[in-house]
Image (cartoon, helix red, strand yellow):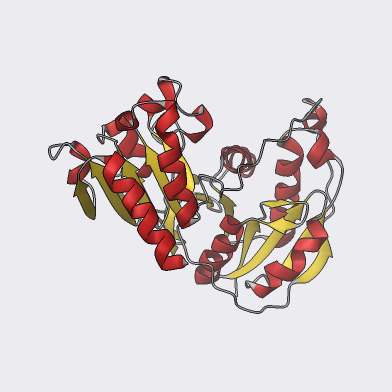
């Protein structure tokens, strides 16, 4: 059976959820071969094998941490040459898309970004994408070379399937460009204890209707009751009510959770572009004519300052 390269996103050996989703998609078109790089790469083998990786190519060179993306591109190209896969799958993060684009350029292949589904086709893998702020769904395939495809988080279920997971050392020769840009310092991001916004299964966002930074604790309380990430509209971010790192929208982050709750968000196209592929959308807004209601699965017309605390209390009571 044909092999599919899967680029592993991990932190010191802890595999992140989007990689496990990629293994589910990879099994639809072939046998997953995982590529794990950097410190702790060998420690990923166990969980990768539990989720269908027939082989794990490992390289723990220091270059992956000391320099920017080029060493990872070099390694993925080495894996491509060693395996000759039918496709290369990469998580659709900012770094992942840069790695994928550079790899596609090197091997002379087409690239598909931000796929939300993947299936086998007679002429090669077919990817589903959302286009024009998710107003349309398209199906695409690469017509030249080996497809390099980045996939949005939460696009596929995580399905454990035991496989061999044989660990092999990946031989990598780094190019001259690999050491061109050095990382000189790092500052750990302060943890909120909440899931990463782009990977969360549930996202609760607040907008202009929250009416001030001092009121965002209402949104945070609902998010915490659900184990969710917190998002914000551009209006809330531009007003300084919440950090830019939490902005959802065309000029912020794109999310595709199982559940998206929009509180006090009107639903401008800029925001919709970043969350329209969410599986289930719930809106809370006191304006019954707000554009967000044209998009939602469930809508609550009411004052968020009344609705959201009651919702939080009800969820907490049911959990307790």
Depicted 243 relative to depicted 320: above or below: above
Which of 113/228 is in front?
A: 228
Q: Residue at x 24, y 50 (%)?
A: 296
Q: How many callouts does the rendering have?
A: 0
Q: For the view shown, which residue lies furthest in the top direction?
A: 239
Q: Relative to 36, is 245 above or below?
A: above
The spot of residue 309 in percent (x, y) is: 35, 47
What residue is rendered at 60% in x and 78% in y?
A: 161
Instruction: Quadrant for residue 174, please give it.
Output: top right
Location of the N terminus (image quadrant): bottom right
Looking at the picture, does residue 150 appear above or below residue 267? below
Q: Nearer the viewer, residue 101 or 85?
A: 101
Front position in the image: 199 or 147: 199
60 left or right, relative to 6: right
* 75 with respect to 161 (left or right): right
Can residue 285 be seen? yes
The location of residue 110, given as percent across then percent down, is 50, 45
Q: Residue 171: horizontal and vertical position, in percent?
A: 85, 53
65 in relation to 237, above or below: below
Of 43 and 298, which appears nearest the observer? 298
Question: At which x and y percent is residue 66?
Answer: 83, 34
């Amino acid at each position: 059976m044909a092999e599919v390269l899967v680029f592993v996103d991990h932190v010191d050996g802890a595999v992140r959820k989007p990689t496990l989703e990629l293994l589910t998609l990879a099994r639809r078109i072939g046998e997953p071969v995982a590529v794990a790089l950097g410190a702790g790469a060998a420690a990923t083998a166990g969980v990768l094998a539990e989720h269908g990786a027939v082989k794990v190519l490992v390289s723990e060179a220091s270059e992956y941490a000391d320099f920017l993306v080029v060493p990872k591109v070099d390694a993925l190209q080495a894996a491509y040459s060693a395996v000759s896969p039918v496709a290369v799958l990469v998580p659709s993060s900012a770094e992942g898309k840069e790695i994928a684009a550079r790899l596609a350029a090197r091997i002379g292949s087409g690239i598909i970004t931000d796929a939300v589904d993947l299936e086998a086709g007679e002429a090669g893998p077919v990817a589903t994408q959302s286009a024009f702020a998710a107003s349309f769904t398209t199906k695409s395939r690469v017509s030249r070379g080996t497809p390099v495809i980045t996939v949005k988080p939460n696009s596929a279920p995580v399905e454990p399937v035991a496989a061999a997971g044989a660990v092999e050392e990946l031989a990598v020769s780094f190019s001259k460009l690999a050491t061109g840009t050095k990382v000189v310092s790092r500052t750990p991001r302060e943890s909120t204890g909440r899931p990463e916004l782009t990977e969360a299964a549930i996202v609760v966002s607040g907008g202009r209707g929250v009416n001030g930074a001092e009121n965002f604790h209402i949104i945070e309380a609902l998010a915490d009751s659900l184990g969710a990430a917190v998002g914000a509209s551009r209006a809330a971010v531009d007003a300084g009510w919440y950090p830019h790192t939490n902005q959802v929208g065309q000029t912020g982050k794109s999310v595709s959770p199982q559940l998206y709750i929009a509180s006090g968000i009107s639903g401008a196209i800029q925001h919709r572009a970043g969350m329209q592929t969410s599986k289930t959308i719930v809106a809370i807004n006191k304006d019954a004519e707000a554009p967000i209601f044209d998009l939602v699965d469930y809508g609550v017309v009411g004052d968020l300052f009344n609705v959201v605390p009651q919702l939080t209390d009800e969820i907490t009571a049911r959990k307790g």
